Image: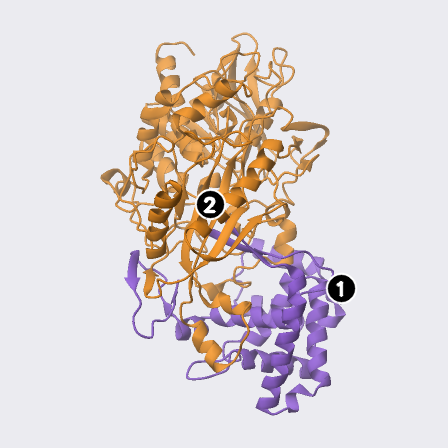
Amino acid sequence: MNLNLKADKAHTFDAIVVGSGMTGGMAAKELTERGLQVLMIERGREVKHIEDYDTAMKGPWEFEHRGKVSIHSAEEYWANSRFGTLANEETGPFFTDDQKNPYIEKRPFDWIRAYHTGGKSMHWGRQSYRMNKNDFEANAKEGIAIDWPIRYEDLEPWYTHVEKFVGISGQAEGWDVLPDGHYLPAMPMSAPERYFKETMMKKLNRPVTIGRVANLTKPQSWHTDLSRASCQYRSKCSRGCPYGAYYSSLSGSIPAARKTDKLTVLHDTIASEIIYDEKTKKAKGVRVINQNTMAVEEFFAKIVFLNAGSMNTAALLLNSKSNRFPAGLGNDSDQVGRNIMDHHLGVGANATVEGFENDYIFGQRPNALYIPRFRNWGTDKKDFLRGYGYQGGASKTDWKRGITMNGFGASFKEDMSRPGTWTMGFGGFGEILPDPSNRMFLDKEKKDKWGIPMIVFDAAFGENELTMRKDMMASAVEMLEAAGFKDVTGFNRQDTHPGLGIHDMGTARMGKDPKSSVLNKFNQVHDCKNVFVTDGAAMVSSSCVNPSITYMAMTARAADYAVGELKKQNL
Amino acid sequence: MNRRTAITHVAALLGGAFSAPTLLAMQRWENRLPLENFPAELILTENQKQIVAEVAEMIIPKTTTPGAKDAGVPAFIVMMVQDCYKAPEHKSFVEGINNLEKKQFLTLSNEQKTALLKQVETDSAEEMKAYQVQQTKMGDNEDREQMAAQKKGLPYWRLMKELTMLGYFTSEAGIKSSFEYVPIPGKLEMIQMQPNQKSFAY
């Protein structure tokens, strides 16, 4: 009896956070700093900050295939390798083996995962933009899907809160379309980029700014307190940064949560089900499976935060069936798993830049230029809804230019050791509209090796996205030509699928009405108020800006609210 | 030395330095690609291997700085064709070597070798047009090269050129002798080119 009580106690926390990535880390930090004992559950292996960044300091010659993906790796990481090259030996450790973690595609879906401590925060692009006021209002104004239950003003203080903590380098510009945040000094633009910025404003009235990126250019005391140092401009971020210069859960939120002495982390622990208590009408905990030993355990808490990544969060809700929620926890509306959004990409243009021969760059900038949305903004009106932003910039060609050039021998070799001409290019990130028929669900029969139903994807780009893509390529060409650059070539890749943006979101949307949404305005599951979903699943529309900073702001806001409600004994 | 013995040798050399997962991975790699299933056309004769080495050295010759052979590029090329390309490229790679072998490449004078390789280069430029090579700029400043899928493998010259350059300019000897190698820049600066400015490599 005593033993059981002890065991129960060891399994009981104030809060359980499922996932250790971008939002899981932030939830753990915000909850522990407000005094809660938190259990964080991570399904993948443990990665220790710095000491497990095995490839971080390697020279190019230390990678067997020198950045190329072997046929063998391409088979293991098949979803990743259909388009990308991230499963190479440099960054592969922070991506997930698709062969060992299969999923089912009714329609193709590029599901890129990161099953380890820190999740996708280990390899994110670090671009951090606030959504603008219109992003929160557009659904209502245009009659698309449902309205957001919150507005920009609700999130504004929380954007500031997380931006300061994360540390974002950028330039405040005063543009409505891209609200300014709290920034560390901006990274410089190269000479052709400065020329491009000026020319775009003059000729096309389109703003260009330096990327707002979560790399420390001037660490503040709260960064150095966590042993985070300044960026060294190696641009090898996705190998893991031994300087802690780019923000990840490992460099930022998890160390901050550990400082409170209130964080417990379990690795190799897959959350299979949320345990619903029919009597209290609340969740009482989470059932988990150890991915190696297959041991099943239960953990209990007053509140549960779901931060497993949009698709796994939705799968966990769907797999949590009870008498009250026969279709999955919080799924009265049948919206769990629906409205998958992402950002579509692989479309833009490249050009050769003449001149600026004497200009060069020392160091590798882990950042690019950003061209905020200009479509359907102000007086602009196109034959599609919403818009897109571009990321890209200028660089001098290196030896790789020789691969497609004619020539070989001594003078060719000598020539290849010197920088070539400047080139400039941009790729777009387009908003995807929510559509209930873009969905994921659990297979009725097929199960993974842990006995959890497999995820089936059934989603595709819609007419609006396909029409937008044509304009994304045309406008990129237009801008590079307006700048007077040469050999301007557009591209619009047809072989990308939803998911590839790795901004997958929308599968448990917020809303005002429980009949058409899964979460309320504080990210609580309607009718199961002690379960909070604060990863990308909560998104009602996708905007076209990179979403992580929004997810983090939403998480901090929900955590603050949750602790307040706990104190008022409302949860 | 075949792959299996190579792995055993390396493992022994390192005195069990490989972790269990690495050894498992090697084992699995072995099981997946047993020697007998290796594409036969990729088993090169000594003469063919010498052609690979000689062509690589013609592309990146030893000058005041090391050449392709010094940097271990020939073995790298064969390994890469094996590991990173599929049957169509295996075929075109060997076909290209065979063509040079027929013309007694190794016995030619330097001038004749250069002239022959120039011809090969011109011919493959024509072949490459079918591939519709396209540069794609992804977000986060990543460049990718995309080619239309072809039944026929990439031309021999393109494979040789790319793999020779990749092997050389990412080798320790190649990087350090060709470029200003700055693994930890520590700062980001927009600068003016110096006389004889070499590329920075990171």
Quarter of the image where one finds residue B102: bottom right
The subunit letter for the residue under badge 1 reads B
**Neighbourhood count class around disc 2 (C-alpha, 10 Å): few under 14, some 14–19, many 20 upward:** many
Closest to the observer, A114 or A546: A546
Label 1 element class: helix
Q: Position of residue A243 (x, y in %)?
A: 33, 50
Packing grade of label 1 (10 A; few <14, some 14-19, many >=20) is few
Residue A147: give x, y in percent of width and height. Answer: 49, 18
Q: Chain of mark 2?
A: A
- Residue A97 can be seen, yes or no: yes
Q: Which residue is mark 1?
A: B37
> Depth-wise, is mark 1 or mark 2 nearer the camera?
2
The hue used for chain B is purple
How far apart marks 1 and 2 lie (CA) works out to 36 Å
Residue B73 rendering spot, x and y as whole percentages: 55, 74
Give percent across and percent down for residue B145. Answer: 56, 57
Q: Residue at x 56, y 59 (%)?
A: A68
Chain with colour orange in the figure: A
